[in-house]
Structures are given as structure tokens and as C-alpha cells.
Amino acid sequence: MTQLDLQALQALDAAHHLHPFNDNAALAKKGTRILVRGEGCYVWDAHGNKLLDAFAGLWCVNVGYGRKELGEVASRQMTQLAYYNSFFQCTTEPTVHLSAKLAELTPGDLNHAFFTNSGSEANDTILRMVRHFWAVQDQPQKQIVIGRHNGYHGSTVAGASLGGMKGMHAQGGLPIPGIVHIDPPFWFADGGDLSPEEYGLVAARRLEQKIIELGPENVAAFIGEPIMGAIGVYIPPRTYWPEIERICRKYDVLFIADEVICGFGRTGEWFAGQYYGFQADIMAIAKGLSSGYIPIGAVMFNDRVAKVLAEKGGELAHGYTYSGHPVCAAVALENIRILQEEKIVEQCKNDTGPYLAQRWQELGDHPLVGEVRIAGMVGALELVPNKRERKFFAERGKVGVMCRDFALKRGLILRATYDSMLLSPPLVISRDQIDELVVKTRGALDDTARELGM
Ligand code: PXG
């Protein structure tokens, strides 16, 4: 692309395209970066820079870029039957096969799928579904859903309400009624003198306190990301999720796991439920379901929920034009075939995951790094002013952005939330590429420390 073409594209973008989660006036001044190609773990921008994508797009390109099989499957399905809906007694072959495949892959008796276009829509669907589930069992007051402060469950009205991002709630009068939040498990900032394991139990019991305060007869469900992604990869202690599950069972509160980031191998297991040893009643999936090649999400729900919906639910007055889109389903099926046949999840669990953990942990010796977090192929470095204290920078976020920009100059895409540097590479990353990632990250940390005069 010539410089002129690039500038023209940037000008058109600034004039006509409102970017998600961006201050668009500021962005227009800087000019957007235009990405043109991807292969494996690398993407190329319009200047011809080759960048190692340590963030897999947006936590999603699990099988890596440039997989021709996925394009071929999409092309074949588009030619044969580009679209048909799942309303009016109809469905399509890939959609049926995908629901059966997901029933087989997901843990326990999550045997039923409802298809959406995204993770946000999956969580919207779940809110409707759980409220309906209790209403048709003569418990219409059992409607409150408990989420967590700083959780992320998407950007639609229900998704943003279930999530606990203050900045999102401040716009548009959110959360909607009947959704409350408890504090998330984040030992670094909140654990005090407790060991992470002790703290995991304390953090989980906040759910019990909230259920008792609200009255169990009023609480429909609890929702959480097994590992909180967008806020900064908060990896809860091992004790947290089994205790959450126990509490949900005790008070008959439906347990919803938002596996949109964690699903499809991110933790080195197919799902984080297997990593932590819990069994959810309902699960939201998206992202890795198609490795981001095409928009698709789903709600997986268990036999109990399915039985109630079938026997008492009548019509669930909910659905999208593209629920179960045949092209998206065909691509998702092919993506799952690749993950299975190439044993990509097993490789992460047994080889590249442990290697990444070892190399990532080494960065803990850097003066800027206050905590290293890693679980399978997802992790973070918490940058701090003083390594000996578990305290944030006074002005949060400045140093994270600085480090992210230095990484980019070195050809590495890292993401920053406040001063947490986030890691979520394609699952196909090799040992050599992990070495490259760690060397470049250390370089960016050094550049940042120098800039700060440390
Ligand atoms: N749940 C979780 C756990 C997510 O991470 C969604 C739901 C919503 O999915 P859709 O497909 O509707 O975007 C997500 C999405 C970030 C960032 O800044 C993260 C997401 C989306 C946008 C930005 O890390 N995750």
C-alpha cells in the first residue's frame, strides 16, 4: 500500500467509522493502524511491519491466522446454502452437527445449545433464559442475577449490566433492574495477609453473604468469568470456584460460567470448568468457538434447564435472524476439527503451556513487575512502582500504555488494562515464538523502566 493510499484510508476511517471502546476524536488525530494480513501468530500492518500477536486478535484467534481450510469450508457452505434460519420448524445440517459436537465437547450434561452471533448475545440470552426458567416453575420472584464488579460479559444492554464495569454502567442508565454485583477475587489488591488459598474462600463467600442478604428465593443465578479477562487477567486461587459451586448448589442458584475467553483451550483444558474442577449449569461461549474467523456464540445449558424449558417453558420468545447460521456453524465445526486433529489443546496443556508459564514467570525478576499471573495460555504482568509492595501506580494506566507502545515498536502486540500487561497468544504458538515473545516483552519492560528513570 502506498503512503497516499494509507493516508486516504485513515482519513475515510476518521470521517465515517466510529470505533468501539475508543475516544474517537483522539483516535482520528493519531490515525488508525490498518492490518492487512495474518499468518500463524503474526499479522502485518499496512506499513509492512510484521507483528507477533500475543493477544490473538481479541482473545480469539486460537488456531492462528491464515487457515485456508476455514475459508474453504465457508465458501463451500455459502455456495451450497448460504443461509437458512432455525425458526419455523427448520434448521440446517451444520447447525445440527455443531450442537451435537458441542454437547460432546463441553463438560457434564451441558447437552443443549442455543446459537447467537457473539458472546454478548449469549449472555443476553442467558438472562432471558434463567428468568424464564424460574418463572415457569412458579417462582416469578426468583429473578436477581449476581455478577461481579469489574466483570466483563459483553457490551449489549444485558451484557454490560451483568458485567461490572463502572464506566459502561455510567453510560445509558445501567445496570438494568435485578442485577447486583459482588467484589471479584483479586488477591494482589485485595488479599491482605491471607494466603491466596485462604483468600479464595473469603472471596467466594461474598456470594453466600449476598444471597442471604437478598433472600435465596429471589436469586435466579450467579454469573462469572472463570478467569476475568478484560479487567486484567485475574486468575482466582484454586479454592474459589469449588466454593462458588457449593454455594450455588446450597441455595439452588443457577451457576453460569462465562467461558467466552476461557473456552476452547485457553487454559490448556477445553474449558475452564475442567481446569478448576467445577460444573456449571449454563455456559456462554464465543471467540475460540470459531477462532474469530466468523461471528458465532452459543449458550450451552444442562439437562435440568432443558427439561424445564421443554416441559413447562412453552415458547421462549427469543431468537436472532442468524441464530444457528449455517456458514458460521460450518466454520465453527471445522475450527473444532482442527483443534482436535492437531491436538492443539493437548499441546498447550503438556508442552507449550508449561514452557510459556516458565518463560513468563522469568519476567517476574524485572524491577517493574509486581506480580506474574499465568494459567495455560493466558496471563498478565502487573506493573508496579515498588516491587516490594502490592500497590498500583498512583495514576493508573499510564505506564501500561507506555509499555504497550514500546512493545509495538519491537514488533509485539501486547494489551494493557490499566498497568496489567495481558497475554493471550494463538494456541499454536511455538517454543521459538514464545522465546521471541518473552525477549520482546523484556525489551519493552526495559524501555519503560528507562523512560520512567528507574
Ligand atoms: N464475555 C466475556 C468473558 C468476554 O471477554 C464477551 C463476553 C462478549 O463477547 P462479544 O463477542 O460480544 O464481544 C467477552 C468479550 C477487552 C475486550 O478489552 C474483551 C472482550 C470484548 C471487547 C474488548 O479485553 N471480550
Image (spheres, rainbow, N blue to C red):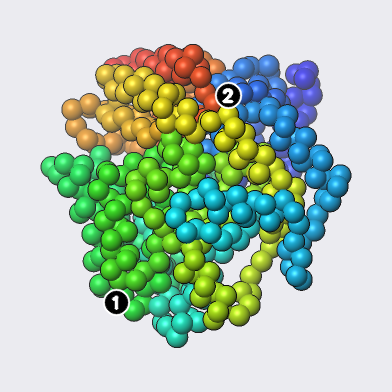
Q: Can you see residue 167?
A: no
- 5 with respect to 408 (left or right): right
- Report the front residue among 88 and 337: 337
* Residue at 78%, 29% in the rendered image: 8
| Quadrant of residue 316 within the rendered picture | bottom right
- The answer to whether the beta carbon of the residue marked 2 is less than 8 Å from any atom of ligand 1 is no
Q: Position of residue 370 (x, y in %)?
A: 27, 29
Q: Position of residue 232 (x, y in %)?
A: 39, 40
* Residue at 60%, 80% in the rendered image: 314
Residue 280 drawn above or below residue 54: below
Report crowding for label 1: few under 14, some 14 to 19, many 20 or more residues within 10 A (C-alpha): few
Q: Which residue is mark 1?
A: 215
| Quadrant of residue 453 within the rendered picture | top left
* Residue at 84%, 51% in the rendered image: 81
Q: Quadrant of the C terminus?
A: top left
The furthest residue to the left: 193
Q: Position of residue 275 (x, y in %)?
A: 37, 42
Q: Earlier in the sequence, mark 1 or mark 2?
A: 2
Q: Which residue is mark 2?
A: 41
* Residue at 36%, 77% in the rendered image: 218
Q: Can you see residue 349?
A: yes
Amino acid type assigned to the residue bearing label 1 in the image: Gly
Residue 444 drawn above or below residue 94: above
Q: Residues under labels 1 and 2: Cα distance?
A: 49 Å
Q: Quadrant of the N terminus?
A: top right
Q: Which mark is residue 320?
A: none
Report crowding for label 2: few under 14, some 14 to 19, many 20 or more residues within 10 A (C-alpha): many
| Quadrant of residue 162 within the rendered picture | bottom left
Amino acid type assigned to the residue bearing label 2 in the image: Cys
